[in-house]
Image (cartoon, grey):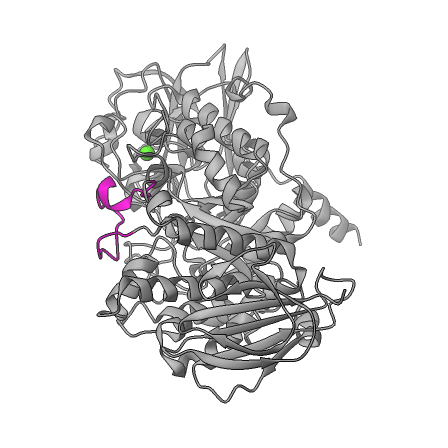
Amino acid sequence: MLAIALVGCAAKQQPKLENECLYGADKTEFQFWSDVAEEMEVHIYNDGMSAPASLNDANNGTDVTEVVETVVLKKGNDNFWRGTAKGDMKGKYYTVRSFQNGEWAPEATGIFAKAVSVNGQKAAIIDMKETNPEGWAEDKRPEMKDMTDIVVYETHVRDYTMSPNSGIEHKGKFLGMSEAAAINHLKELGITHLQILPMFDYGSIDETALDKNRYNWGYDPVNYNVPEGGYATDPADPACRIREAKQMIQALHKAGIRVVMDVVYNHTYDVMGCALGRVVPQYFYRMNEDGTYANGSGCGNETASEKEMMRRFMVESVCYWAREYHIDGFRFDLMGIHDQETMRQIRAALDEIDPTILTYGEGWAAMSPAYPYEELAMKQWTYKMPRVGAFSDDIRNALIGSPFDHERGFASGKAECKEAVIGGLVGCPEWSGEPMQHVSYITCHDNYCLRDRIAVSAKGETEETQLRMNKLAQTAVLVSQGMSFIYGGEELYRTKQGIDNSYQSPDSINIIPWENKEKYNDLYQYYREMIQIRHQHKGFRLGTAEMVKEHVEMKETGEEHVIIYTIEDLEGIDVAEELIVVLNGGDKSVNITIDEGKYIILAQDGKAKAEGLATFYGGVMPVAAYSATILAEIDN
Ligand code: CA
């Protein structure tokens, strides 16, 4: 009994990786974990501009002329190495390095640096309290009464702000996303969550040469716990990016929009170019038997979430963003590289902060990870990770075709996809435990945007027909019982000129075409109204697999291109008694017969209106080619 009690006690007092540098006005305390180092030391610098001397040569050691102080660290029983720099260190920079196997590893920021120099090569000692914008203490997550309300909109800081037509002043910056011109569109559209492509410090953009206007998605992590400098007005001021990221989040929160961060713990930009690779060489990665780095990410390496300290790092990191930056959700890139247990622990840790913090990810890897498949957070095992969602490539491929070919999908005329669409509409295929774990989507930053996808698969069809297919596909997403996810700019009929991997394409390819809000206003209004229809009708988002089973009834149609279903017995659940959804993915109009009653037509023939387009009293109704009809029965 005593032994058990002691173990429990020790577990509670585990030192935190996030406390690697604790600033105080009279001293700064450091602690870093390593179970293999024979010596460890911290170097203090006055200058943040230049990279540490050892950056490009692992064996060169440090240019001692730059180091203003060396803090020799002492190892504790817990494998944390600790030391203190006396005096007020604010404004200085640090690196850490470790000695093992007869040599000094190259110096690096610690793995949990919270502030960094330009390009993230040195960690900065700052007083985090000074990074809070005015009113930050009062910043609250927008209310989230019902998790099924969620409609996620994915965008990238540059995609959204760089266009000369955006009306946004701080183009390409966190501050741009916080301007009214940016936020009003999102409010008007009715989305609840903004998912931002990587906003942590990444490596592919030179922060000292931003005038070159390079573009990158940012899936190349360097410092996981620091915002990207390229999005700050002054990347050389370590506090600036932190303050401005908080300002963006604060402004979105004020507008009632929650913020989801795209996190990429599955690999690093470059093993020896970042702290995870340098401070404890090899530890944080999965290795092949021949001593090379495993590569489930397709980017040259994969991290090892099953190892204790990598797991703790991920858990602490998401909690840090949730607490320090008030982040409301996390989208895990290549989540299938992580193990399920880590995802469950992340969920549990976030629940202690706020159970409405959203978690979902890509339930796949780029290549085979070097870990047993049945332990990984792959889509197939989503049901084993309650309240962690996974993107449904099933509904995506069924509606518009797979990204691996140029075939059509159900919404563009391929009847064979009907059954798979039905699986996605109910949000409960075998893999998802509950419908909210089924992320319903057709497009995201990866692969073709919707306009381009339909253009390559339904080549030869008129623009009018392609727009009908577009609306039909997105309708299916927005009436699906799964969680709704829309790629930013689809509502404005964006095109990437046929480029299906725009990760480093110029702004001209990636920017959202604001001018289309007028030109394709009909499409924009359709998206907006469909989002409102989802918000107004709880029947489209019943929330549990049990409720879906009880209320959703698929009908025989006799038409291979047509799906008809009802959501029934909604008294006390929805303002409607019953909802009827008809999706016609064929190129001919079909007639359907509706029982006598009083119905509000919510969508018909490429038009949608939450207040209703017209009233219908039952009888025969035509459903036009490539279109959705949605009826709400009201019995008064
Ligand atoms: Ca960077």
Instruction: List the single residue furthest toward the bottom.
Output: 558
Residue 116 vertical placement versus 259 (above, below): above
Quarter of the picture containing the C terminus is bottom right
- In this rendering, the answer to whether 187 lies above or below 283 is above
Measured as percent of width and height from the top left, residue 113 is found at 44, 31
Is 120 positioned to the left or the right of 185 in the image? Answer: left
Left or right of 544 in this view: 390: left
User: Can residue 332 be seen in the rendering of this structure?
Assistant: no
Looking at this view, is 82 or 319 the one in front? 319
Where residue 575 appears, as percent x and y from the top left, is 72, 59
Residue 435: quarter of image: bottom right
Q: Is residue 181 magenta?
A: no
What quarter of the picture does the N terminus occupy? bottom right
Question: Is 99 positioned to the left or the right of 498 in the image?
Answer: right
Position of 553 relative to 296 (above/below) = below
The image quadrant that residue 295 belongs to is: bottom left
Q: Residue at x 66, y 80 (%)?
A: 595
Residue under the point 56% across and 69% down: 427
Ligand 1 lies in quarter: top left
* Of the pair 220 and 445, the residue shown nearer to us: 445
Residue at image position (28%, 20%) is: 49
Q: Which residues are magenta?
A: 495-514
In front of the other: 59 or 360? 360
Q: Is residue 212 visible?
A: yes
Residue 457: image location, x then y, percent: 27, 70
Majority secondary structure of magenta residues: loop
